[in-house]
Amino acid sequence: MSSDPLVVFTPSGKRGHFAVGTPILTAARQLGVDLDSVCGGRGICSKCQITPSYGEFSKHGVTVAADALSEWNSVEERYKSKRGLKEGRRLGCQATVQGDVVIDVPPESQVHRQVVRKAASARVITMDPATRLYFVEVEEPDMHSPTGDLERLERALKEQWDVPAITADLSLLAKLQPVLRKGNWQVTVALHADHRGGTPEVIEIWPGLHEGGLFGLAIDLGSTTIAAHLTDLETGAVIASSGLMNPQIRFGEDLMSRVSYAMMNPGGDKEMTRAVREAINDLTGAIAQEGKIDPKLIVETVFVCNPVMHHLLLGLDPVELGQAPFALATSDSMTLLARDMELSAMNPRAQVYILPCIAGHVGADAAAVALSEEPGKSKDLVLIVDVGTNAEILLGNTERVLACSSPTGPAFEGAQISSGQRAAPGAIERIEINVDTKEPRFRVIGSDVWSDEDGFDEVIATTGITGICGSGIIEAVAEMRIAGLVDPSGLVGSAEQTGTARSVPEGRTHSYLIHDATAEGGPRITVTQGDIRAIQLAKSALYAGARLLMDEMGVERVDRIVLAGAFGAHISTKHAMVLGMIPDAPLNKVSSAGNAAGTGARIALCNIAARAEIERVVREITKVETAIEPRFQEHFVAANAIPHKTDPFPDLAKVVTLPDVSFNTGGADRSGDGGRRRRKRA
Amino acid sequence: MSSDPLVVFTPSGKRGHFAVGTPILTAARQLGVDLDSVCGGRGICSKCQITPSYGEFSKHGVTVAADALSEWNSVEERYKSKRGLKEGRRLGCQATVQGDVVIDVPPESQVHRQVVRKAASARVITMDPATRLYFVEVEEPDMHSPTGDLERLERALKEQWDVPAITADLSLLAKLQPVLRKGNWQVTVALHADHRGGTPEVIEIWPGLHEGGLFGLAIDLGSTTIAAHLTDLETGAVIASSGLMNPQIRFGEDLMSRVSYAMMNPGGDKEMTRAVREAINDLTGAIAQEGKIDPKLIVETVFVCNPVMHHLLLGLDPVELGQAPFALATSDSMTLLARDMELSAMNPRAQVYILPCIAGHVGADAAAVALSEEPGKSKDLVLIVDVGTNAEILLGNTERVLACSSPTGPAFEGAQISSGQRAAPGAIERIEINVDTKEPRFRVIGSDVWSDEDGFDEVIATTGITGICGSGIIEAVAEMRIAGLVDPSGLVGSAEQTGTARSVPEGRTHSYLIHDATAEGGPRITVTQGDIRAIQLAKSALYAGARLLMDEMGVERVDRIVLAGAFGAHISTKHAMVLGMIPDAPLNKVSSAGNAAGTGARIALCNIAARAEIERVVREITKVETAIEPRFQEHFVAANAIPHKTDPFPDLAKVVTLPDVSFNTGGADRSGDGGRRRRKRA
C-alpha cells in the first residue's frame, strides 16, 4: 500500500493516494472526479472550488488533520477579496495534498451537475452541453517556424485540454488575431463539440478569462405561440422564460391554412419564414434583456416544432406537407448556423439543433415529448397527449411506442370560441355549475378568489373578466353536460328544457350565460351552441387519435395518461374525461406534464447524449398516419357525442354521473350552425 | 479454369471470366476497370462507350468472334440517332458478353482520364476531382414508413453508388422537393467529397439526367493580376482562360502598401476585400460567357495567392502580415462555401479550396508552384523562381526543400518603369542592341516582325508601339549592359562616353532612346537611369532571395533553374542571367515553367489527392524569412551591380562577354533619383 496521503472525494466516493504537494484539482482529474475548471488550474476561474472536511471519518477510514491541505495562499486570498469565497471553501488548483483528506465537491463545482427539471417531478437533467468554455495559453508566433494563429490555438487546445482538432469559420478567424493579442496570448474559447463526433468548432473567443457565462435557448415553436427558455449552459439554470404569439397566425390560424397560403401565394412560404424568424429575433432580444445578458452570449439554440413550422422555420416550402403522402424535405435532426437561418439577435455562429421529425404530421415537437416523457421506458402502457392546435399523441411502453398527430384546431387554445381568448389575466380558467340551481361560479387567471367569494369585486376591478381561456371552455362544456344543460349529442337546452334563465336563445339555438356585465359596459360571456360544436370537433379529433393508436396496439385500455402542452398543465383531468377528450382511465392515473415539448428542448440543449438518444428513439417509433386512416374517421364520428356514463370507471364514478337528458325536439337546430343549413321550423 | 467467356480490357490489361449475358459495364466494375458511368448503367448517359476488337489477339491469347458481344440494341440505336456514336463504339451498359472478347476503353470513357498539362511538358494531370455527377432513382415517399426526401436520396446514393452518407445545406434542401418531383424521382446530383474524408455534400441537383457538364475555376490571385482557368471537371479540359487587373492596385501597387492602407484607414481591409471579391465575380461572369456555360455550373474553385491576398480575399485584416513576426491568421488549407465569401457569380454552394500558406511571406502561390514543379521529387538541386510583384523562391531536391519570398516590387511587371506597361499588343517584348553601332532592333507583342524587318510599318499601323513590358525591360537593360551603354554599377553613359547619339541627357542623368515617334504624335520610348535603378532593386531582391536559400542549403551552385510566373514564360533566360536576376547556371539548365502557380491551382482543382499531397509537402518545406535575415541585406547590396563576367560559366561565355566600362566620373548622378538628393555639379 502506498505511503502517500489518501484523498477521498465526496459525493463520488472516488479515492486514491497522491504525493504530498499534488493539487486537489490534479488528484480529481486523475481519479476522474467531476471537478470543473475553465482556466486549467491557473487560479483565475475559481470553478474548482472544493470543501475540505476535517476530523475523523469512520466511513472512509481516515482522520483528517487540520494541516491535511497546504495553507491558504495568496491566489485564494486575492480571489476571495475580489469576488468572495464561501467560508470553508478552497480553490482545488491551489490547495495541495499534505495528509489524508476528505474533499467534498459542491454541486456548483461539478461539470456534469444535475439540474432538477421541475419541482413537481424527481427527474433531473445531467449537464453535458455541446458548447463549453476553455481557457488556453497560446504560443506566440515565431518567424522561424511559422504557423498560423489558428493552428497555434489548435495546438494549445490539444496540449492543454486534449481537444483533438478544431475548425473556425471566416467570421471567427477575422477576430482571432486581435483577440489573441489583446489577451496577451491568453484567451477563452467557446467550443462546440457535436454529438455526432464532428470536428469541434470555435463559436466565440474572448481575450483573457471570459467570465460572462455561456447561454442557450430552448425554443418550443408552436403554431400559435413561441415559447423560449434562456438557459445558463454552465449551471443548467433557466434564467428567463418568455413567449410571444406566432406572427404567422395572420397567414392562417391552423397549419393547413398556412400550407394553403403558401400554395395560393407565390413567395408566401418565404413571407411566413421571414415573419417567424423576425419573431424569434425579437424574442431573443427580449429574453436576453430579461435575463440581463448580452444576446451574443447565446451560443446554442434547440428548436422543437411540428413539421409545418419546421419547414417554415428552415425556409422550406411546406406544400408537400399539405397533401398525401406528406413527404418531409428532411426528417433527420439538423445542426445549423444561426447566421444561415437569419437568427441575427443571438451569436451569428450559434449552433442551432433541431430535433428529428417522426413523420410528415408528427414533428420534432412529438420527438421532444418522447424525450421528456420517455414512453419507451415505461413499464405501464402510457398515453401521452400533447394538446395544442395540433395534438401530438404517443402510446407505448418498453415494448413499443406509437405516435400520431391529430388536427384538433385552435379551439382548445381559446380561439374560434365566441367568448374565447388566450390564457391571460381576466380569462375564466375554472368554472363550476351547480347541478341543482344551474348557477355558475368561476375564477379568472390572476386570482384565487372564486366569483361567489368575498373579494371578487376587487378581482373585477383589477383584471376584469374578459373571456374564457382554453382550460376554461373545457370545464364550462363539461360542467354544462354534468348539470344537464347539454345533452349527449351536444345540444344546448332551452330555458324550458333546463329550467334556468341562463339558457338564453341565440338565433335558432341556445347559449348558456356565464357572466353579463353589459349593464356596466362590460362583456357578456356565454357558451354558444357553436362553441360546443367546436369543442366537440376538437375533442373528437383528440380522442380519435388516441383510439387509433390503441387499435394499432390492440388494447382497449391504457394504464395511465399524461396530459402535456403549455395548456395541458391547466386542464382539469376530470373535465377532460367527462368531455371524452381522452380515453377513460382511473383519475389518479391521469397526470399533467406541463410543457413536455419545451422540456424536451431543454434536455437536448443541456445534454448532448440526449440528442443521440432521441435520434435513436425516433427511428424506433411506429408512425400512424391519421389523415388517411378510415378508422380515424370512424372514431372521430363516434366520439362526437358527450355520452351517458352508464358504466363509468370506478374512479370517475365517484365524481360524476352524467344526466340522461335529451333536447332533441325535432325542431331544434342540432347542426350548431345557427340554422343556416336547415331552416325547418320548430 | 472457368468455362465462362474471357473478357480482356485494354489499355489496363485487366481480365476475367464472366457469364454469358453480363454487361460490359458490370464486368468492368467487377475488375476495377476505369469505365465511366453517370447513369449507373441505365443506357442514358453514354459515358460508358467502349470499342470491342475482333480477330485474333496472340498477345491476349484470345480470338474474338464477330458475335462475341450481344447484338446492337434499340437503346444504342436511339442514342446513336439522337446524339451520334462513333463507328465501332458500343454502350458498355448495353453490350453483353457472349464469347471471349477484347474491349478497349477509350480515354474519354475513363473517369480517371489523364490530361496533358501543357504541350511543352510530358506531365499529365490524372482526373480525380472532388465534385462528381451521380444519376439516381429515388424511392417515392410512403406515408406508412415516412422518411424525408433527403433521407431517401441518401439511401439511393448509398444503394446505387456506395456513397456512405450525404449532407445538404438549407438552400439545396429548399429545391430538393420540387426537383425530385419534376424529375419523376430520377435526379442527377453533384456531390462534393472532400479529400479530408468528410461527409460528401450535395452541391447541386437537377431533374433527370444532367447533361450540361460540371465546371471548376482555377484562380491565380496575384497582387497585380487575377488569372482564371475555366476547367471542365469531367474531361479536365481548360475551356476558357481569362484575367483582369487586381482592382486593389488603387489602394497600393505592392503588398506592403496595401497592408499600410489597411493600417491607416479603418475599414480599409474590408474595402479591399470587397474590391477583390467583386473583381472575381466579374471575372467569373466573363469567363463563363467566354466558355459559353451557365456560371452556376461552376461548382468548385481553387485559389492560389500570396498571404496578403489570401487574407484580403478571406476578409481577414492583413495588418499582422505587415510587421514581424508576420503571423498568419491561419496557414492551413481551407475549404469554404462560395456564398460565405460573397462569390455570387458562381454556384452559391460551390466549394472553394485554398491551398495552404507556407509562412507569413510565403503563400499558397508558392505552395502551388511546389505542387506544379515538385522540387521535392527532383534529384537535381533545382531553384524555382516565380517572378511577380513578390517573387516566390524554392530551392530543393529529394532531400530537402527551402522556400522564401522576396519583395521585388512591380518593376518586372512593367510598372514603375518610365515607358513601362502591362504585357499587351504594342508593348516591346524583345530587344537587341548592336554592340558596334549601339542601334536597337525590337519586336512588339502581337507580331513576329522585328523593327528592322520588312513589314514593320504594318505592325506600327496595327498595334502601334506603346511602351515596354516586363520581359522587354529586362532585355533592354541587359542589352544595354552588353553593348557597353551601362557600366557594372548601373550608370547610363553619356553620348561622349558611349559614342551614340541615343544616349540622351535627362536631367543630370542619361537615358537610352529606343524609339521616338514624337514627330508623328507617338510616344518617345527610353530607358532612363531611374528605370535601371528600379530593375537593379528588383533583380537584387530576387537574386538575394535565391542566394539566401543557397546559403541555407550550404551550396554555391544549383543544378538547374526554373523561371516561373505568368511573366516567367516570356523572360529570356540569357538576359536574366546577364542581369544577375538569377544565380549563374548553364543556359541549357535554365527553363521556363510558365504560370506554375496557376498550373498548381489547376492540378488541385482536378485531383483531390494532389490537395492532400501539397498539404503534406508544405509541412515539410523549410521556410526562410528574408525580411529579418541580415544576410539577405548583404546579398541584396552585393547584388546591386551588373558585374563584369570575368569568369563566366561555359555556356554563357559562348554568348556574351560583358564590357569592362565605367562611367563613374564623379559628377554624374549615381543615385538614379534624377539628382533630387545630391545636387553637386559635374
Image (cartoon, coloured by chain):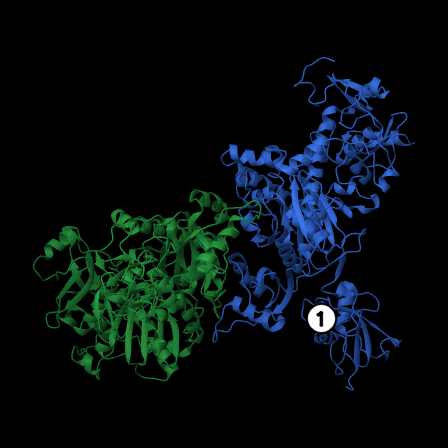
Chain colours: A blue, B green
Depth order, front residue of B466/B653? B653
The three-letter code of the residue at mark 1 reads: Gly
Q: Is residue B570 at all visible to an observer of this figure? A: yes
Residue B160: where, in percent of width, then height? 44, 57
On screen, A201 above or below A485?
A: below
Q: Residue at image x 87%, y 25%?
A: A438
Residue A306: where, in percent of width, then height? 62, 44
SS state under label 1: loop
Residue B79: where, in percent of width, then height? 28, 49
Quadrant for residue B231, please give it: bottom left
Q: Quadrant of the C terminus of chain A?
A: top right
* Residue farthest toward the left in the current orientation of the protein: B454
Q: In which quarter of the image is the N terminus of chain A?
A: bottom right
Quadrant for residue A179, please give it: bottom right
Number of numbered discs: 1
Disc 1 crowd, CA 10 A, few/some/many (<14, 14-19, 20+): some
Q: Mark 1 points at which residue?
A: A43
Q: Is residue B490 at all visible to an observer of this figure? A: no
Depth order, front residue of B70/A509? B70
Residue A389: where, in percent of width, then height? 67, 37
| Subunit that carries the residue with mark 1 | A
Depth order, front residue of B362/B682? B362
